[in-house]
Every structure is written in C-alpha cells, then in structure tokens.
Amino acid sequence: PETNQTVKDAIWQYKHDRDPKEPLLKFGRCLAHFAVDTDLAYMTTELKGKRTFFLPFNKGDEGGAGNPANADGFRSDYLWKQTWQPDSLLEIIQHFLQVVDILDDKGKKTGKRKLIFPRYHQLHAVRGLIAHAKAQGPGNNYLVEHSAGSGKSNTLAWTAHRLSGLHDATDKRVFDSIIIITDRRVLDRQLRQTVQSFEKVKGVVTAIETQKSTKLAQALETGADIIITTIQTFPFVAEKVGEIPGKSFAILIDEAHSSVTGEATASMKSVLSAKDLESAEDAEEGTGGDDEDAVNAAIEATMKKRGRLPNVSFFAFTATPKNRTLELFGTPVQDGTFQPFSLYSMRQAIEEGFIKDVLKNYTTFKVYFGLNKKIEDDPEHPRKKAIALLKSYADLHPHGIMTKADIMAEHFHTQVRQHIKGSAKAMVVTRSRLHAVRYKQAFDAVIKRDKLPYQAMVAFSGTVKDPDTGLEFTEAGMNGIAETQTAKTFEQDKYKFLIVAEKFQTGFDQPMLYAMYVDKKLSGVNCVQTLSRLNRTHPDKDEPVVLDFANEMDEIQEAFQPYYETTFLTEATDPNKLYDLKRNAEDFLLYYQPDVDAFAKIYFGPDGTQEKLRPILDPVVDRFGELEADQQKSFRKAVNDYVRIYSFLAHILTFTDSGLEKSYQFLRFLRPLLKVRKEPLPTEVTDEINMESYKVSQTASGSIALINKDGGLDPISDIGTGEVREEETAPLSEIIHYINENFGTDFTADDKVKYFAEDMKRRIVEKEGFGKAMDPAVNPSPDSRRLIFGNYYEDALEDMIDGHTEIYKKLVSDEGFAQIFQLAMFKQVLKALERRSASVA
C-alpha cells in the first residue's frame, strides 16, 4: 500500500511489460495470471498484450463489487490463505480447469481453444453445493441466483460433473444419475456443448434431443452418469419406465421458473420416487386390500410423490427467480423468508464490469394518436373490447409502424453504428408476430429509401397471416435462410437489426448488441431477461442504449429492483387458501362430491382409462355449456386457480387431506373440456373510425437508478374470487373520446397535415391499377401521368372527408394551399413508386 500502486498497475504491467511469447507465459503453459493488491484481485488465462482481458476474482462486498473488510488482515488474503493453498489449487486443476475447443453453431471444432479458470463466485458456489450434498445426502433443494451473463452454464456444468463422482463419508455414491433439465423445447445447444466439453472420460454425458423417451428411459435404467434433456420429455418417461427402485438422483434445472412446478415435474417425481423393487411392483400391479383401500393407497402414494422426495435433490440455476422458484428451491431462514443458496448479484456483476448496465442510457417515448368517427350513426360496442381493438388498430397502422421505424433507423445510423468499432447491432422488440412482420417490411423500405448499408432480420415462430393483405409470412421466408440459421447469420456484419417477437428475448448471447428498440409492454422477469440481451461485454463496448416506445422509466425500475441485489421471498404461501379456492369452484354447483369420488375411484383404480372418466365429466361440461358467457369465464377461472396453486404447493408440502388431491385430479381433467363461449369481437369498429393525427414524442432520457437494497418478493397472492364482471357497452363516440383523452395530446396543425399527407399517399399508391397507369413504359407522357394522378388524388380526397374535416375545408377554401399540397403529394407519390419499383427489382 505504501507505494500507492494498485491492481490497475499490475494489470498495466501484464499488458505492457510481459511478453506473451515468453515460454512460461504462453497460453496453456501458465494456468492463470493474477493481478493483486491488498484489496482486490483480477485474473486471466491468456496474455494478449494490450488486448488482455482481466476478470475480477473477488468475493463481493455488501451486494456490490470488491471484498469485505477483514479483521485478520488484508481484504484479499483469501487468495493465499484459501484459494492458493495446495489442496485447493490441486482441486481446481483436477475438477475445474478446462482447456476446451471452440465449436461452431453445428458443434464442429474451429481449431481455436480456450482455457477456463473458475471465477470466485463460481468456485464458491460449486464447492458449497458439493460440500452440502456430501454431508446431507439426497432430498434437498438448492437455488443458485447468478446474474445473467455471469457464466451460469459453466457453474452448472462443474456442479454436474462434481456430483456425478460424489461419494459420502462411507465411500458410497451419493447420486446414481445427474439429470440436467433445460426449460426450452429445443435442447440448448450451448449448454450441452459446455457440459460435454467438461467431461474427462468419454461417454459420461448423454444428451436426449428427441421428444421420444426410449433413449431417456434407457439412460435412467442403466444409470448413465449425466443426462441432459428438456422438461417436456419427462411425461413420456412414465410410459416407458414404471419405477426406478433404490436409486437417488440430482436434478439440475437451467433457468428455473414456475414451469417446473407443473404436472410434467409431477410425472418425473413419480418415476424417480420408488424406494425398492417391492413397492414399485405393488404400485404397478395395484396389490393389497379391497378396491377402496387400493384407491386410498394410490391417492396417498400420489400425494407423497408430489412432495419433496428423499432420494432426489434439485439444483436450480437462474438470474431472475420468481416467488414460486424461491419457495420451491430457496433456503428457508428462521425469520420465515426464503433465500438463494448462492448469490452473484446483478449489482456486483455490473460494478465488477462483468456485464453492462442496460439502464444507464434509457430513453422513453410516448405515442399519441387521435381518432374520429367517420359514420353518422353512433352504434354501441363492448367498451373494453372496442378500446383494445382501437389501440391495436393504431399500433399496427402502417403510418405508425413506419414512423417508429424511421426514428429507430435514424437513431442507429447517427448514434449507434460507430460503436464497437463499427460492428454495433440492434434488437427491435415487438409486441406480436404480426408487428414483427410489419416492422420488417418497414425497415426494408426505410433502408432502401435512404440507401442505408444495413440489412434487417426477423425472428418469430410459425406462420403469420396478415389480415389486411391475406398474405402469409414465416421467419425463413422473410429472411431467405433456414430458421435454424437466424442467430448465426445475424453475426454477419451487414445485418444490423434483429426484429423479434418472443424469440431471442431470452437466452440469446450476442456481445455486438448495443441498442434495443422496445415497442412492447415489459414487466417482471420478462422485462429483466429481455433487456439483459444487451448486457454482454466486449472489449470495445461501452454502456448500451435503449429507446422504449411502450414503457415508462418507473415501470422498468420496478421490474429490475428485486434482482439488483439479493432476491428473497418474504414468506411462504398460505396453504389454507386452497380450501377457499376449492369452495370457489364448488359454489357454482356444476358438480358435487359424489362426482369427485366416482372420478377418483376410477382414476386411482387399477383399470382407470380416459374412456371410463368421460361419462363422469361430460354432464358437468353440459351444465357448464348452459351458463352465460361471463359465468363460464368465472367458473373456468376458479378451476384454473385451484389447479395452478395446488400443483405448486404440492411440490413443497405433503398434504394429508385426500380430498384436495381428488379435487385436483377431477378439475385438472375437467379444465381442458371447458370451452368458454366466445363472443365475437366488434371488429367493425375499425371500419367506423379514421385516424386523424399521429405523433411520437420523447418523454424522458437518462439513467434508471436502482437502490442498493435486497429485493423482496411476496408469496403467491393473485387469487381472486373467480368472478368475472359482465362487460359494459358504450356508444362509439364515447369510446373514441376515451381513446383521444388517454392517447391523444395537443396536436398542432402540422401534426394533422403530416399524418393526412402520409395517409393520402398510402391510399393513392395502393389503389388498384395506379402503379401501372403511372409507369412511363406504359404511359410515357408526363402531362398524361400528371392528369391521371389528379384523378386519383381527387378520389382519395373525397374518401377522406369524414376523417379529416378541418384539412379538407382548408384545401377547398384556400386555392394556394391546395396547389402547393397537391404538387407535394405528386412528388411524394412518384418517390414511393420509385422505391416500390426498386424493391421489386
């Protein structure tokens, strides 16, 4: 300390005074290079001169970067007192240090290699998990909350491999098989490659990539060491493997969220829970006692299998735990809260420079629009549905999409493209697949119009039909490549915009993403995961930028705050709420206890089939069909609430009331049969209005500050009475007044004229036969083409009288203004036709 030199001086010395070609310092010869002072430590595995990148190797201090005060010496003495001790260092070399091949997106070697040395939080988490599992054995749950971009895949892979070789004090293997589950329908290729690249002996890792369970069943039966699969595969296991007696399992869950609390996990637990061969055979054959005893035994066994299993431990990894995740996998504390077993917070990751602060440069915009009634009548419509339709009408309006695409493209071209040495990219987050399609079309038009040196790609699932044109679109068709190649192709420098609808909002790792343009409401975990696509670091990347057209700054802050430091659950969910939910469903008098008992006798009996269950359920469905639509919605909500909450709580608690389990199975099978009578949407409302004005204005810009405090999540509380209020109707004029009051502003005459001109241009250009009539090859005379335009112009003007009375009156009364306006429109239309012609070419 007396020299006034710090870890920064050590890093500078490594970068400038150490020759990477020196034999001792070469890649792979030296395992790790540490830069250390009395407070901080940083490390790297490869020297690259000035391009050397050092990672922090610190404990963290009160939720942030650095190391805590040390009463016995320097803050950084854990390095030589713990990490660098011979037994610790040998363990790191044996179990953690990895030299791995860098693979391409198809899993083929690229010829490049990298050396992986664990960061402090990774080393600490894995050692803690292994020590606890060795001492306590199976039957425990663990939650690892590590920030997005902090290397969770590596931590998970190290944990899996250590667990697969873990033996207790008597040298007995703690877990017979390690099962890694990813909550994605397509097995995460990156996760699989990471786990497989860490295996020391070939064949330790078995990846199950198909939905068919044969291979998975074989892997479980033969005791494969590490099995990688998806949560969706597990229901198929029950068909292939009745029970697996006398074995213990470690289940590692990637990005654990509430989806791991459903019936798929119940099926998995059922498969893994038998204690011995005799109990497995008894369950299979339904032996013992009379029918009633057998049914009761089956109900009791099912309830036990739902709860915590003594032979199964769960290890959940996530950056953004929900309340259910914390209650299911978190560590209970004496004060009644639930905490993660291991934490590497978002705040620490940002302060250490390991991830970028995505809230540092945040700008919000608000979209304003004005509607008016173009019909004389004032029909009544369901108020909520009509308002939703009119908002959607404005959101999808070609003028609105094009206006926002113009702002995004201009912002990228003037303020983003030069970043990351000219390699910066942007993501456009849209609210639906149809929005994504129209944004792609708008970006293509803007890029061609302004001759921008970029290309845009789109990402969405399935096929989208545009209701206005009847045309169908797919991701592969719009991008011109196979859907599986979207992420890899986007790496090419010419592709700057990735327009997404749900896809790539989670799990997408692209360090070149520098800007995000948000046109979708975001909240909670989805908000954090989406914006975190920007947080990946790059040596030439400074703080990213966000332009948000749909959310306010305080809404974004509210979503991020719980995950900034420690995330904890304030208290457990009250199981007594189940009885309230059960009564909510029973109060509709559509079914009675004898119905539930008859269902349970068949369902839990040895010969239960769907065919035998339907005669019990069908009368309930018939009575449901006689209800009014609002009552149907209320009952279905009551059923859904009970099924959802019971499914969750049954994974935490072992209930003793068999009536709860019987009601759960009865309502679970009834739920998909309840088809709520859909009332037609008042789609005609969009034919009865015109958009008169449209404006996008910036509302705020700056950094969204998060508070340095732990984030408490409340237990599940979104449980209502099941009642759905009957929707009121309102006159069209009142609905339009509400829209204009809430989404309008003080529009200037220029705002209205600008929108009017854009709307007219679109109407004229899209008119059938206009393009051909204006083609010089068809009609070479300029005067003739001007005359043709005049006719179409007059027709469009007449069509727009109802929606734009003020401007129409000015065009009719002010001859000078009318001539200027028509000439400007003529020039704009010619430009539009030129762009369309170039696009076709």
Image (cartoon, rainbow, N blue to C red):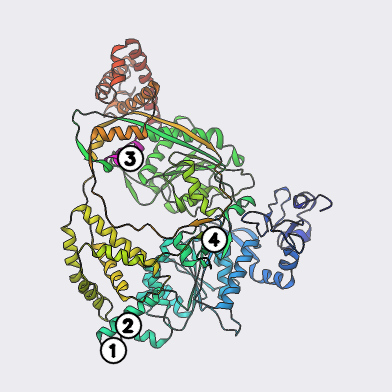
- Image disc number at residue 289: 1
Q: Which residue is mark 3?
A: 392
Badge 3 or badge 2: first in the primary sequence: 2
* The one of 345 and 269 positioned closer to us in this rendering: 345
Q: Pointers 4 and 3 in contact (CB under 8 A)?
A: no
Asked whether the residues under the numbered discs 1 and 3 touch, taking CB atoms below 8 Å apart as contact, a structural biologist would say: no
Coordinates of residue 186 in the picture (x, y in percent): 43, 60
Q: Earlier in the sequence, mark 4 or mark 2?
A: 4
| Rendered position, 291 above or below 145 | below
Alpha-carbon span between mark 4 and mark 1: 48 Å
The range drawn in magenta is: 386-397
The amino acid type found where label 2 is placed reads Ala
Which numbered disc, 2 or 1, marks the residue that appears first in the sequence?
Answer: 1
Which badge, 1 or 3, comes first in the chain's sequence? Answer: 1
- Using a 10 Å C-alpha cutoff, classify the residue at mark 3 as few (fewer than 14 neighbours), some (14 to 19) or many (20 or more): few
Which residue, as the protein is rendered here, is positioned at the far front? 335
Q: Which residue is mark 2?
A: 297
| Neighbours of disc 2 within 10 Å: few (<14), some (14-19), many (20+) | some
* Above or below, comparing residue 816 to residue 687 in the picture: above
Q: Are marks 2 and 1 in contact (CB under 8 Å)?
A: yes
Q: CA distance from mark 2 to mark 1?
A: 9 Å
Residue 145 numbered mark, or none: 4
Question: How many angstroms separate mark 4 from mark 2 (CA)?
Answer: 39 Å
Lateral position of residue 270 relative to residue 728, left or right: right
Q: Amino acid at mark 3?
A: Ser
- Cβ atoms under marks 4 and 2 closer than 8 Å: no
What percent of the width, then of the height, locates residue 99? 64, 64
Tell me which label, 4 or 1, sits earlier in the chain: 4
* Numbered disc 2: secondary structure: helix
Residue 496 lies left or right of residue 789; in this view the side is right
